[in-house]
Image (cartoon, rainbow, N blue to C red):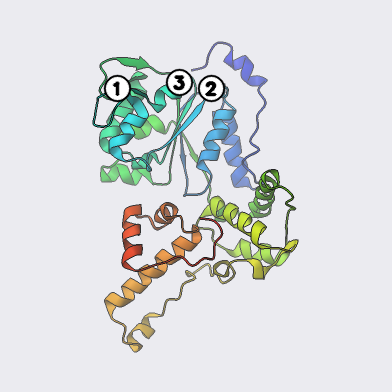
Amino acid sequence: MFPKNMELKSSTRTFSCKEIAGVSDAVKQVVNTIRKVSLSDASVLITGESGTGKELVARAIHNNSYRSKEPMIVINCGAIPGELLESELFGHEKGSFTGAHRSRVGRFELADKGTLFLDEIGDMSPDLQVKLLRALQERKIEKVGGITTTNIDVRILSATNKDLSVSIAQGTFREDLFYRLNVIPLKVPPLRERIDDLPVLIEHFQEKIVQRMYGYSKKIFSDEAIAILRNYSWPGNIRELENLVERLSVMVETDTVMPPDLPEYIVNHNTTTLPMESVSVSSIFKNGIGFNEAVEEYQKSLILYALEQTHWVKARAADLLKMNRTTLVEKIKKMNIEQEQEFPFS
């Protein structure tokens, strides 16, 4: 599992996890797991909701491993159409399919001696799962349209926001591949379960802004503003908080962030209900609203809420709503939902 003398070298290796900010017990547990698994070459399956920082965890594992001087190659299995993903992973030979005008090296070969991070692994098609499993078992790959195999030396890290046990039960994910990827499970907690890290994360994101924005001075978040942010459920998790901090850094002209500076949907947030302009069941009947109209209005409110939470990034909103992006886009068009020019970032 280790190269020669790896055991001795690992004892003198400096461990660093500075990109994962936090002081909560939940984060300390994640960092401790990263420290342990970085000394091995075992496959790690990183799970957690969208926006929790699963790729950051993967990079921390790679950067603290003996493979750190070699590349970490990232591929989002959910963002690439199934018919192209095989070529992206394994490469292809010239003429192997329409449009293959030249030979191409795949991500496995690019990651040789390093790490391959398979993000959104739960979205991979069953047919391709079979080929991935064979590559992991044999440590060999074959390009699309090729007749020869290539040896690979790659550590596999993967991530998903799905419950793969449910996918296995539904027959959409192979159980044998799950066990091959899930040698070491690592769950990243959502922000609402590590809310004590909020001030630390705000400071961390402002430090990043200072490094790339000339003349920027960090804001002070008032106790009242922090209290409101603590009461919010953060469905977009760390990514949503980072976007908010950047938004406030641009829009707030004073040195201190106060409650009126925060978005209305956060200020008015109630942990038991969604902040949308929906009516009660009784008022639906009193106002003569029909069933179909009420359902459509509720769907529209859900979609608007998800879009606002993710700053109108449709792929992230679809993840939050647990639907396909294409389905979301169709509903947005059908319901004539348009973005108000409120958010500076998209």
Residue 183, horizontal then vertical, whole percent = 43, 30
Asked if 32 appears above or below 204 in the picture, the reply is above
Query: Label 2 is placed on what type of residue?
Result: Glu
Cβ–Cβ below 8 Å for labels 3 and 2?
yes
Circle 1 is placed at which residue position? 93
Q: Residues within 10 Å of mark 3 (few under 14, many from 20)?
A: some
Q: Earlier in the sequence, mark 1 or mark 2?
A: 2
217 relative to 234 in the view: left or right: right
Q: Residues within 10 Å of mark 2 (few under 14, many from 20)?
A: some
Mark 1 falls on what kind of element?
loop
Asked if 188 appears above or below 325 in the picture, the reply is above
Please state which of residues 121 and 91 is positioned toward the viewer in this rendering.
Answer: 91
Q: Nearer the viewer, mark 1 or mark 2?
A: 1
Cβ–Cβ below 8 Å for labels 1 and 3?
no
Mark 2 falls on what kind of element?
loop
Q: Residue at x 32, y 30 (%)?
A: 87
Q: Earlier in the sequence, mark 3 or mark 2?
A: 2
Whole-number angstrom distance, CA of label 1 to CA of label 2: 25 Å
Circle 2 is placed at which residue position? 70
The quadrant holding residue 116 is top left
Whole-number angstrom distance, CA of label 1 to CA of label 3: 19 Å
Can residue 32 be seen in the rendering of this structure?
Answer: yes
The quadrant holding residue 182 is top left
Circle 3 is placed at which residue position? 112
Q: Most extreme residue toward the bottom, as rendered?
A: 286
